[in-house]
Image (cartoon, grey):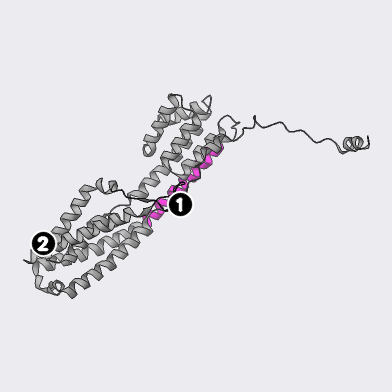
Amino acid sequence: MGIVNGLFGALCGAGFGIGVLMVRHAFRPKASRSRTSPQLAVKFDLRPLLFKWRRLLLCLAAGIAAVAATGWPVAAVLAAAGCWWLPAVLGPDRESERIIARTEGCAGFAEMLRDTLSAASGLTEAALAASSVPPKAIEVPLRTLHSDLRHGVKVTEALGKLADTLVDPIADLICATLIHANGRPSRNLPATLTALASEARDQALAMRKTVAARAQIRTAVRVITAVILGITILLLVTDSAYLDPFSTAAGQLDLAVAGGIFAAGFAWLIRIARPASVPRFLTRLDALNQAPKSDDLPPTIPPRPRAARDTEATH
């Protein structure tokens, strides 16, 4: 009877958690309001959850296993939540590694552009040559750039598409520099690309130092979590009577409070470990492409000497 009640509590807890996620997704405001309606636009989209159905099933299985082993409904909720969020805390920092690799790839692309500009007959040919052997971290966007340029897409449009695909401030700087240099005298372009590549590598090095410092905190969190889970499983197997006070309503409340404190700590760790997002600036390519070139500017009329103006005024 206790196991049945525990399974019922686990299902209720899982349903409550899914309901909270659905409400959160349903009432999340859009990034921008509609121009035709002054009301706040809401979005109800469960597709992100549908793409993670295997993870949802794994969390549900962990909750059912926890309540079957302990008979505690709160344990089911904690196990399901831990199965969903703990990998982000205890696992490797893949997001930071991806950003570092992308930044270093942008630096390599800038250096290849610099080296091919001297041998190429123009910016389009240089971009084609540099994107033919792309760095692995940004291989797919550069292959797309190469294909676009070979099929006759304008270099400014292809570079804008590249910047929108990479979504990186360094990539914005490189693409903006190339777009501005298109059709203009580009004597300083190799030096500018060298400076951008150096800046990108400096940023990647700084991020690597930050990731290395955070690795110690992740190791400490792994040890603490493993010790707590190990002791709990050991007591359940060897001396389950020691944990009988948690089977009461007050014990479940205490377990919920302790789990909430741990959850708050893990959420804080996830928040501080998340890489800071730098806002992009290359978002108005239409204005950049329409900027007047030096050859398109109207000729300036030099001012006449003051003596000529005084002579005309007397006449």
Nearest the viewer among 197 and 125 is 125
Where is residue 129 drawn, in percent x and y?
A: 45, 27
Q: Earlier in the sequence, mark 2 or mark 1?
A: 1
Q: Quadrant of residue 269?
A: bottom left
Nearest the viewer among 43 and 176 is 43
- Give me the residue at 16% from left, 59% from top: 11
Quadrant of the image for the C terminus? top right
Where is residue 130 drawn, in percent x and y?
A: 45, 31
Kind of residue indicated by mark 2: Ala
Where is residue 146 drawn, in percent x and y?
A: 42, 29
Left of 34 or right of it: where is 178? right
Quadrant of the image for the N terminus? bottom left
**Secondary structure of residue under mark 1:** loop
Which residue was labeled with disc 2?
68
Q: Quadrant of residue 190?
A: top right
**Secondary structure of residue under mark 2:** helix
Nearest the viewer among 285 and 178 is 285
In front: mark 2 or mark 1? 1
Where is residue 80 drawn, in percent x and y?
A: 21, 58
Kind of residue indicated by mark 1: Pro
Q: Which residues are magenta?
A: 191-213
**Extreme right residue here?**
314
Which residue was labeled with disc 1?
38
Q: Main secondary structure of the magenta part?
A: helix
- Give me the residue at 47% from left, 30% from top: 127
Where is 234 relative to 18, above or below?
below
Left of 196 or right of it: where is 270? left
- Give me the residue at 35% from left, 62% from top: 268
